[in-house]
Image: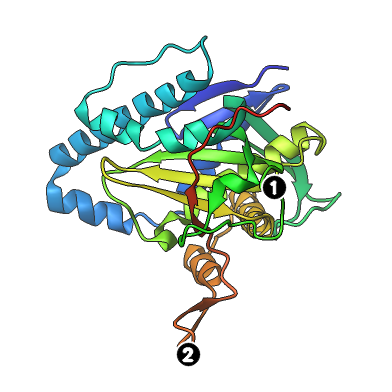
Amino acid sequence: MAIERIDAVDGRFYSYEGRKWPSVNTIIHKFEPTEHLHKWRAKVGAEEAARITAESTKNGTRVHRNNEAFFSADVEALPLDETQTKIAANFSGLLNAVVENVASEKAVHWTGQIDFKGLRATDGKCVGFGGTYDALNLMRKGSFLNKEGNPFFKEEGANDLILVMTDYKTKKRQSKVEWLIKYFIQVSAYIGAVNQMTNCELGVQHALISIATTKTIKHYLLEPHKVLFYWQKWMQMVAAYFYDTGFDWEAMIEESMGTFDPDKGYHTNSFLPRLVQIKEEDTKLSL
């Protein structure tokens, strides 16, 4: 059965099998702190804030469309202005490293019964959500390098293939990784939905959030245990939405960051994703 997207005053929803479910972003927006946005709008003025927001949305829409067109002759690329061209160019290394684009701009859904803590329970509320992910890509493990330029997957074959839930983000400037938590939640939610819809046949476990500006691109790789961490947080958020309770966003950030070790000079037990590089190479392999 088709999944229908519905845009309403109170957010975006997805209709499936006669039920209407909130989108991933609609749930996130209910709990995500917005004080910094209010301060920013007050600083630049309502008119300028609206202009910047509209420009950012246009840039994101056009670059996303062209990333999709890179893999499909059925999708028409859109003309890009100078800013959008620079942003799009920074995605080229990633797009060329994809062995196969399994799907792009695909709507998904998830339903289940959970209690008020976000745990599966047969006597819990029937809840659900929908969303549209950017891309599900098949990539070689050897395409991922750490920040020093060495293989990220050290003990595994470079030609081994993994499915990667990929999210393209466009920004005016790069942000601190702890400010990107909602993106990690998003991709983990999409992975959960895809795995439920396919009865785990695809077994998606990795996610990549690629954030491009006109000057740089940063790739954040979520490994399976980190995807699971954010999925669990997502389930708690979904429960808070449907049970109409609160969700402690700041506590989630603190837990994500782990504990700072002054002797080592970095956080331990962190669930923040690793910053990786994408190795540009010919990926036309025989599958």
Q: Residue furthest right?
A: 122
Q: Residue at x 31, y 46 (%)?
A: 216
Indicate the quadrant where residue 138 lies: top right
Q: Is residue 130 left or right of residue 8?
A: right
Q: Residue at x 49, y 31 (%)?
A: 96
- Indicate how the structure is coloured in the image: rainbow
Q: Give the position of the C terminus as an image quadrant.
A: top right
Q: Please state the horizontal and vertical placement of residue 26, each as a whole percent of the image.
A: 50, 40
Distance in Å between CA atoms under marks 1 and 2: 33 Å
Q: Which residue is mark 1?
A: 205
Residue 157 appears in view: yes
Local SS, label 1: loop
Q: Which residue is mark 2?
A: 263
16 is higher (above) or lower (below) than 196? above
Q: Residue at x 46, y 27 (%)?
A: 8
Q: Residue furthest bottom?
A: 263
- Bin the neighbour count of mark 2 within 10 Å (Cα to Cα): few under 14, some 14-19, many 20 and up: few
Q: Please state the horizontal and vertical placement of residue 70, each as a whole percent of the image.
A: 47, 21
14 is higher (above) or lower (below) than 248? above
Who is closer to the viewer here, 279 or 270? 279
Local SS, label 2: loop
Q: First in sequence, mark 1 or 2: give its number.
A: 1
Asked whether the residues under the numbered discs 1 and 2 touch, taking CB atoms below 8 Å apart as contact, a structural biologist would say no
Which amino acid does the dot numbered 2 rest on?
Asp
Q: Nearer the viewer, mark 1 or mark 2?
A: 2
Q: Please state the horizontal and vertical placement of residue 87, each as a whole percent of the image.
A: 31, 35
Q: Please state the horizontal and vertical placement of residue 9, each as a whole percent of the image.
A: 42, 30
